[in-house]
Amino acid sequence: MVKNSESRWAVRLTTLALWALAAASAVYWGLRLSAPSAGLAVSAAAAAPVAPDAQAVARLLGVGPAVAMPTAPVASAGSRFALLGVLSGRSSGGGAALIAIDGQPAKPFRVGAVVDAGLVLLALEPRQARLGAAGGPASLTLEMPPRL
């Protein structure tokens, strides 16, 4: 009779251990799933490159104050715009382009819309947008970045 009593206790203790393990697992996953998520990472727009201070670099290299340093070049019109997406209407000739100006968030522009002062979206191709004066020839062609 002693042997039967010992086997009952072994079964009871094993059952208790399994239930404790199941409860611990439920608590762990409950806490894990109820924790606030970190959320989606927001992509930041790339900041404009910082021009180095030419006079400070000259002083660091030992050039006297009499040396005049050239100023930073003015950004060209093509470097102000970034083409991020194109929806071209093949049969209609219309469509829209997703264009970022001066590092700002991109905005959609339809064909014929004014993009910037004096520049209108004239035409779209699968990976290009042509900008120019209204009714005139294209003076600027934007291309999408290459696919990775």
Image (cartoon, rainbow, N blue to C red):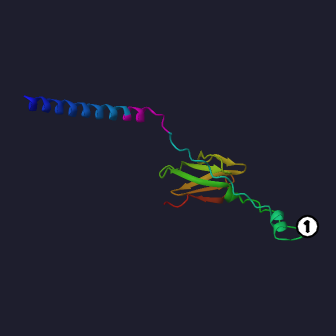
Front residue (pair 134, 70): 70
**Residue with the mark numbered 1:** 65
How many numbered tags mark residues here?
1
Q: Residue at x 67, y 58 (%)?
A: 79
In the rendered image, the quadrant that contains the N terminus is: top left
Q: Is residue 53 magenta?
A: no
- Residue 145 pos. (x, y %): 55, 59
Label 1 SS: loop
Front residue (pair 143, 19): 19
- Residue 45 pos. (x, y %): 62, 49
- Residue 57 pos. (x, y %): 80, 66
- Neighbor class of circle 1 (other Cα within 10 Å; few <14, some 14-19, many 20+) is few
- Residue 76 pos. (x, y %): 72, 60
- Which residue appears farthest toward the left when viewing the image? 1
Q: Is residue 36 above or below residue 61?
A: above
- Look at the image and give the residue range highlighted in magenta: 28-37
Which amino acid type is marked by label 1? Pro
Say whether residue 29 is left or right of residue 96. left
Say whether residue 141 is left or right of residue 86. right
Q: Is residue 10 above or below residue 54?
A: above
